[in-house]
Image (spheres, rainbow, N blue to C red):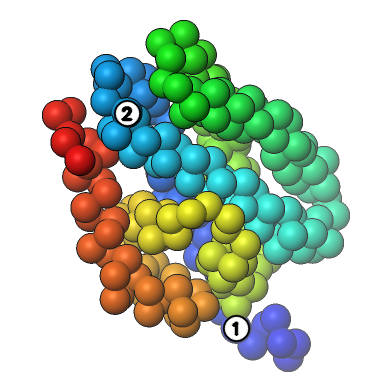
Amino acid sequence: MTDFDALPLADPSDMIELHRVFRNCFSQSSSLVGSIAGSSQRAQVVASYYSNVTRLLRVHHEGEDVLVTPKLLARNPDQVDLIERIASQHTALIAVIDRAERRLAAWRSDFDRSAQVELIHALEHLDAELTVHLDAEEAEILPIAGRCMNVAEWGELPSHGMQNFDGDKQWLVLGLIREQLSAEHRAAMDANMPPPAVAMWANIGQTMYTDFMERLHEPTYQP
C-alpha cells in the first residue's frame, strides 16, 4: 500500500463553500460600492473589504496551481486537455483582477463619482468572468480531485492560503470563509491551518470580523 492509498480520498465540496465567498462578495459590488454617498469612513470599509477579497482570490488560485493542478494532470492523463483548459482560466482572470484592483485604488484615493462607477463596472466584470470559471471548476475539476487526491493533499490548501495571503485583514477572510463552511469543514480547516492563525481567530479575530461586517452592511454607518 502506498502513502497515498493509506489515507481516504478528499472531499472537495469545501471548495464549493469557499467559492460562495467570491460569488457573494462580487455579486454585491453594485449595492456596496454604490451605497457610498459622501462618507469617506464607510468608503474605506468597503474598499478594504474588496481589497482583501481580491487578494484572497489570488492566493486561492495560486494554491490550486501549485497544489492541485499538477497532481490532477499527473494522475489523469486521459483528461489533460480538460484540466489544462480550466486551469488556464486562472491566467486570463489575472488581468481582470488587476483591472479591478486598479479601479479600487483609484476610487480609494478620492472616492470620486466617476471612479466609483468605473469600479462597479470592473467588479461586475470580474464577477461575470469568475462565475464562468467557478461553475466549470465545480462541475468538472472537483469530481476529478475527489477521485485522485487524498485528505492530506487536499488539506494543504488552507495552510497555503493563510501563509501566503498578503491582505491586511487575515481575520476578515477567515471569517468570510468560516461563515460558508459546514461545521465539519470548519474543523478540518482549523486542523490544517497554521496554529498562530487559529489562535488569532479565537482570541481577537472573530470579534473584529463581526464588528467589521456590521459596519460593512450598515447603510448609515458612523465611525
Residue 184 image point, x, y percent: 34, 71
Q: Is residue 34 above or below residue 189?
A: above
Quadrant, the C terminus? top left
Q: Which badge, 2 or 1, is on the more N-terminal residue?
A: 1
Q: Does the image show residue 23?
A: no
Q: Is residue 110 above or below residue 179?
A: above
Classify mark 2: helix, strand or loop: helix
Q: Nearer the viewer, residue 120 or 192?
A: 120
Classify mark 1: helix, strand or loop: loop
Q: Nearer the viewer, residue 90 or 109?
A: 109
Q: Nearer the viewer, residue 186 or 216?
A: 216
Identity, as a three-letter code, of the amino acid under mark 1: Leu
Q: CA distance from mark 2 to mark 1?
A: 52 Å
Q: Residues within 10 Å of mark 2 (few under 14, many from 20)?
A: some
Task: Indicate the quadrant where residue 97 lies.
Answer: top right
Task: Indicate the quadrant where residue 190 lies.
Answer: bottom left
The residue tagged 1 is 7
Task: Indicate the quadrant where residue 198 lies.
Answer: bottom left
Identity, as a three-letter code, of the amino acid under mark 2: Ser
Q: Residues within 10 Å of mark 1 (few under 14, many from 20)?
A: few
Q: Nearer the viewer, residue 79 or 207?
A: 207
Residue 214 image point, x, y percent: 19, 45
The residue tagged 2 is 40
Q: Is residue 125 above or below residue 176?
A: above
